[in-house]
């Protein structure tokens, strides 16, 4: 069909040239008007480069994507499992101060000389340790020997630490350590959620960016196909040069290559979004995110105050400093000798035969002090000094974390201001590129120049549009980053 159109053009052009040899502008205008008919068929074919929306496509706005990633992201689910593990660990440690019941049963044989006896029995230990270190124990027991002799008894003991082991802080050390680990895992989960939300926002806008590039390059391809057809016809009629044709076709190939790259990156980014929201990769997804924005207006001092009040990293640094102090106090407590007061009482009852009614009683009691202490305390002294160093290091890390957060806030505000200026410059560049392209198009259509200026101005306009789109996306994602550095991106 296009061959027939070109033949018709050449026949008509010969007539126009014969009638208007001294009017090359009129001849060129005739060519351009005729090419519009040919360009229409090129444009219709190029529309297929734009992604077609299937009937079963799922469309998700940015808010829904963020909600899904918070609920379904596999990495966040793993961090939740870590929190649950820390909760179970804390529950296990807290059971140290519960009542403990330990039943014991035995069955066996004993031999003395020529006599072999069967011995069996059951006993138990019921104990409880308080948070101050005081431990009480009850030990009931019943024993049988050859079913002829039976003994039963009950004992009670009391152990009170006097120096090292006395006090809630010392005895609750495992509980406090487990609670610190739990709170740290919760904060880690929150930070992971913030990073994951930021990542999915960037990925979503990367999808929007590449999809816009696909649309942009598709339209540019349509325009260049028409321009290439024009230059070929002008060359065939002697009104153009082969250089114009080569230049147009080379630029067309460049745009086609850029279009293929944009399509590949669009699909890759879309798959990454699907993975983040735990959506099957085979499903068809379309994401939507606004490209409009409002300028961020906030004073640096105000932003810093908000960050100091909300950043969880500061809370974690403070908790680590307090934990280091607590550990140092425990290490200092361990410098004391291990001295315990122990009191024990036990009452036994014996039966000589199951049918006997004669009872014998046996009582046992003891009171005393026990100690197991290294006099030099070298290891304890070393650990205590190390704990003091940990306190100093944790304090320095807390101060450094605070300064880093303040620097992050100021840096992000500066980035937004610079990006705002770049957006204004790119908008001006687009206006200038459009004017330059229009002028080059007029010159070329009137035979006043070749298509070099047209191709160059068209390339500059396309680059300016790409830069403007990237600037808008960078500003929008930068606003999300600012909320993250101020600690307000996600509600705790």
Image (cartoon, rainbow, N blue to C red):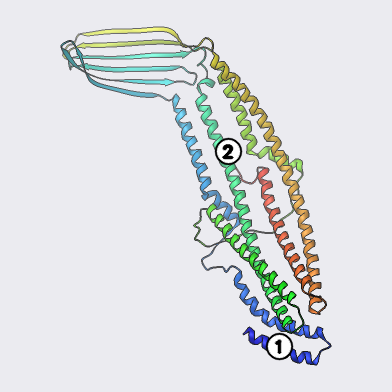
Label 2, secondary structure: give it.
Answer: helix
Q: Which circle, 2 or 1, is nearer the viewer?
A: 1
- Which sits in the foreground, 292 or 117? 117
- Which sits in the foreground, 236 or 453? 236
Q: How far across and how far down the image is residue 285, in percent?
A: 55, 61
Q: In this view, does 253 lie above or below 409?
A: below
Q: Please name the residue that numbered disc 2 is placed on.
A: 187
The quadrant of the picture occupied by the N terminus is bottom right
Q: In this view, does 72 lie above or below 251?
A: above
Q: Is residue 333 left or right of residue 220?
A: left
- Which sits in the foreground, 200 or 486? 200
Q: Which residue lies most toward the front here?
A: 242
Q: Residue at x 32, y 21 (%)?
A: 124
Q: Please name the residue that numbered disc 1 is placed on.
A: 10
Dot 1, how many residues are within 10 Å of its Cα: few (below 14), some (14-19), or many (20+)? Answer: some
Q: How far across and how far down the image is residue 82, in percent?
A: 50, 39
The disc at residue 157 is: none
Marks 2/1: CA distance?
A: 76 Å
Q: Residue at x 53, y 45 (%)?
A: 76
Instruction: Tell me, yes or no, whether the two marked residues, 2 and 1, touch with CB atoms within 8 Å.
Output: no
Q: How far across and how far down the image is residue 417, in percent?
A: 76, 50
């Amino acid at each position: 069909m296009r061959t027939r159109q070109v033949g018709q053009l050449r026949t008509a052009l010969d007539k126009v040239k014969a009638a208007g040899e001294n009017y090359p502008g009129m001849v060129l205008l005739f060519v351009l008007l005729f090419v519009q008919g040919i360009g229409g068929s090129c444009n219709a074919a190029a529309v297929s480069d734009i992604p077609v929306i299937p009937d079963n496509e799922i469309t998700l706005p940015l808010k829904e994507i963020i909600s899904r990633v918070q609920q379904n992201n596999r990495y966040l689910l793993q961090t939740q499992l870590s929190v649950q593990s820390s909760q179970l660990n804390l529950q296990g440690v807290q059971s140290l101060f519960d009542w403990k019941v330990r039943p014991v049963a035995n069955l066996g044989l004993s031999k003395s000389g020529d006599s072999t006896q069967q011995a069996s029995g059951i006993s138990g230990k019921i104990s409880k340790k308080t948070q101050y270190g005081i431990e009480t124990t009850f030990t009931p027991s019943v024993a049988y020997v050859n079913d002829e002799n039976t003994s039963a008894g009950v004992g009670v003991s009391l152990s009170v630490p006097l120096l090292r082991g006395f006090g809630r802080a010392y005895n609750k050390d495992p509980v406090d350590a487990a609670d610190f680990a739990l709170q740290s895992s919760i904060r880690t989960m929150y930070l992971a959620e913030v990073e994951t939300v930021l990542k999915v926002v960037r990925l979503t806008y990367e999808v929007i960016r590449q999809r816009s590039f696909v649309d942009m390059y598709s339209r540019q391809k349509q325009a260049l196909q028409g321009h290439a057809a024009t230059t070929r016809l002008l060359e065939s009629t002697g009104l153009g040069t082969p250089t114009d044709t080569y230049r147009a076709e080379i630029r067309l190939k460049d745009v086609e290559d850029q279009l293929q790259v944009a399509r590949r990156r669009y699909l890759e980014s879309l798959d990454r979004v699907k993975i983040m929201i735990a959506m099957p990769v085979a499903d068809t997804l379309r994401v939507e995110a606004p490209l409009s924005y409002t300028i961020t207006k906030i004073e640096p001092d105000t932003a810093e105050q908000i960050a100091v009040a909300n950043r969880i990293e500061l809370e974690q640094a403070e908790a680590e400093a307090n934990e280091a102090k607590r550990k140092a106090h425990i290490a200092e407590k361990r410098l004391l000798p291990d001295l315990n007061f122990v009191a024990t009482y036990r009452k036994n009852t014996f039966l000589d035969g199951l049918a006997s009614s004669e009872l014998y009683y046996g009582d046992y009691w003891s009171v005393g002090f026990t100690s197991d202490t290294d006099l030099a305390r070298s290891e304890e002294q070393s650990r205590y000094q190390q704990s003091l160093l940990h306190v100093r290091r944790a304090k320095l890390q807390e101060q450094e974390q605070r300064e880093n957060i303040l620097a992050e806030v100021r840096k992000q505000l500066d980035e937004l201001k610079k990006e705002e200026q770049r957006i204004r410059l790119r908008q001006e560049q687009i206006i200038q590129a459009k004017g330059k392209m229009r002028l080059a198009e007029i010159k070329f259509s009137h035979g006043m120049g070749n298509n070099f200026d047209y191709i160059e101005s068209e390339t500059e306009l396309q680059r300016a549009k790409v830069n403007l789109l990237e600037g808008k996306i960078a500003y929008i994602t930068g606003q999300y980053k600012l909320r993250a550095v101020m600690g307000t991106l996600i509600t705790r």
